Amino acid sequence: MKENTTGRTLRDFTRVLFQRWMLLVLIVGVGTAGTWAFCRFWLPQQYRSKISLIISKPATANKDSERAKTEHNLAFQIRAQQQIVMSDLVLARQSHR
């Protein structure tokens, strides 16, 4: 039986691509430059951020062990939120206003 092949191999395909590599670089470069120019000059450059520290007291617990556990969780939550609020990225965003 005769195989149905077109005679094109991967080598033929890559040869065509590498013969036109300057054209491909030009197309990618123009697309990149166009995207950068569009984002830089036509899109609005307004960034808004809001920082808030949310602290909520847990419901009162009747047992001492549950109360200590909830107080520990609340303290951990407050420390985590303070670290987030005082992080370099958040402070940098606030200084650019």
Image: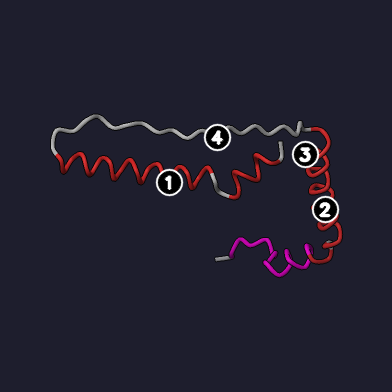
Residue 50 drawn at (x, y percent) = 58, 32
Q: Secondary structure at mark 2?
A: helix
Q: Secondary structure at mark 4?
A: loop
Residue matched to label 1: 80
Residue 61 drawn at (x, y percent) = 18, 33
Does the residue at mark 3 contact the one at mark 2 (Cβ under 8 Å)? no
**Magenta part of the chain:** 3-17
Q: Residues within 10 Å of mark 3 (few under 14, many from 20)?
A: few
Q: Residue at x 22, y 30 (%)?
A: 60
Residue matched to label 2: 29
Q: Nearer the viewer, mark 4 or mark 2?
A: 4
CA gap, disc 3 and disc 1: 35 Å
CA gap, disc 1 and disc 4: 14 Å
CA gap, disc 2 and disc 1: 44 Å
Left or right: where 61 falls relative to 79 = left
CA gap, disc 3 and disc 4: 26 Å
Which numbered circle lies on residue 51? Answer: 4
Left or right: where 32 falls relative to 76 = right
- Does 70 appear in magenta? no
Residue matched to label 3: 39
The quarter of the image holding the C terminus is top right
Q: Nearer the viewer, mark 2 or mark 1?
A: 1
